[in-house]
Image (cartoon, rainbow, N blue to C red):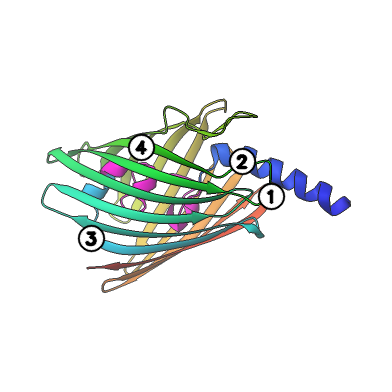
């Protein structure tokens, strides 16, 4: 009985945290959640416009939440960059109280050299062994903008699921709508800073701050946000291969590891 109460409590807390702490990849995990201006294939989740500035890659992310086996995620992304546009496709399986299998299609385009816009269409398949939830299919979308002010500064914006797509009808439960606004500033040639403001519906605004230090083939990152999360991580790049490792530490729930691997083609 004690185990049942404990699991119920953890499930409730994780649901509340999820509303303001989306399932980041290893890089944005280590940056405390800063994501809207960071250029990578995983921008398909956080700002589809960024893909115009990312080279063509095959990328994989695996992540666990708080050491709980039932809260884990794996994601595969393929993105292809053209002259002034980009396309990408992603498959994600995210475990939890409800299993969410999501296929995402992205298209991004530069309007001028330093301004890009992008849209991601997401097909979500929800299923659960819990009788409380019913299997359901949901179509959602994300839209984003990226503006490179100059060589040292850029601004990003994304709106996600603005219509708050419904998971179940009774009792009514919806996917959260989120708005992200952030800025990237290059302090020096080898140091970048990232600041995001993330607003989820019915949640207080969350501020995410991250720092990245570049040293030859390595990148060292750290960050935090107001949702009681601290992150750190490291990247190693050799030729076309890239490996990112990230850890986040939540004040009450514990440690969440995340791993990215990418191959540029």
Q: Is residue 89 left or right of residue 174?
A: left
Residue that mark 3 sits on: 56
The numbered disc on residue 17 is 2
Q: Is residue 30 magenta?
A: yes
**Residue at 69%, 50% in the rendered image:** 253
Q: How crowded is mark 3: few (under 14 residues within 10 Å), some or many (20 or more)?
A: many
Dot placed on the residue nearer the N-terminal end, 2 or 3: 2
Dot placed on the residue nearer the N-terminal end, 4 or 2: 2
Q: Residues within 10 Å of mark 2 (few under 14, many from 20)?
A: some
Residue nearer the viewer, 187 or 43:
43
Image quadrant holding the C terminus, namely bottom left
Residue 142: image location, x then y, percent: 36, 37
Residue nearer the viewer, 141 or 23:
141
Q: Callout 4: helix, strand or loop?
A: strand
Q: Are marks 2 and 1 in contact (CB under 8 Å)?
A: yes
Give how far apart the Cα atoms at labels 3 and 4 are. Answer: 21 Å
Residue nearer the viewer, 259 or 227:
259
Q: Are marks 1 and 4 in contact (CB under 8 Å)?
A: no
Give how far apart the Cα atoms at labels 2 and 3 are. Answer: 33 Å
Dot placed on the residue nearer the N-terminal end, 3 or 4: 3
Give how far apart the Cα atoms at labels 2 and 1 are. Answer: 10 Å
In this orientation, does residue 215 appear?
Answer: yes
Give how far apart the Cα atoms at labels 1 and 4 are. Answer: 29 Å
Please state the extent of the stretch shown in magenta in the rendering: 23-49
Q: Is residue 263 above or below residue 201?
A: below
Dot placed on the residue nearer the N-terminal end, 1 or 3: 3
Q: How crowded is mark 4: few (under 14 residues within 10 Å), some or many (20 or more)?
A: many
Residue that mark 1 sits on: 253
């Amino acid at each position: 009985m004690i185990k049942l109460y404990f699991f119920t409590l953890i499930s409730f807390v994780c649901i509340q945290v999820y509303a303001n702490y989306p399932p980041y990849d290893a890089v944005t995990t280590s940056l405390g959640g800063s994501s809207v201006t960071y250029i990578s294939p995983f921008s398909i989740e956080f700002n589809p416009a960024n893909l115009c500035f990312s080279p063509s890659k095959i990328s994989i992310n695996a992540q666990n939440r708080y050491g709980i086996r039932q809260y884990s995620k794996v994601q595969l992304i393929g993105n292809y960059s053209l002259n002034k546009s980009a396309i990408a496709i992603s498959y994600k399986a995210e475990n939890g109280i409800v299993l969410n299998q999501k296929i995402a299609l992205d298209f991004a385009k530069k309007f001028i050299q330093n301004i890009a816009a992008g849209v991601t269409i997401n097909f979500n398949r929800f299923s659960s062994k819990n009788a409380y939830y019913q299997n359901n299919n949901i179509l959602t979308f994300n839209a984003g903008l990226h503006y490179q002010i100059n060589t040292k500064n850029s601004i990003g914006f994304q709106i996600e699921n603005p219509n708050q797509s419904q998971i179940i009808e009774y009792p009514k439960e919806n996917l959260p709508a989120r708005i992200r606004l952030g800025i990237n500033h290059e302090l020096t040639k080898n140091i970048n800073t990232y600041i995001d403001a993330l607003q989820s519906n019915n949640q207080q605004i969350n501020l995410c701050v991250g720092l990245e230090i570049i040293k030859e083939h390595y990148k060292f990152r750290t960050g935090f946000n107001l949702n009681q999360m601290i992150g750190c991580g490291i990247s190693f790049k050799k030729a076309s291969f890239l490996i990112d490792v990230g850890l986040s530490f939540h004040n009450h729930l514990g440690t969440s590891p995340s791993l990215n691997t990418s191959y540029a083609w």
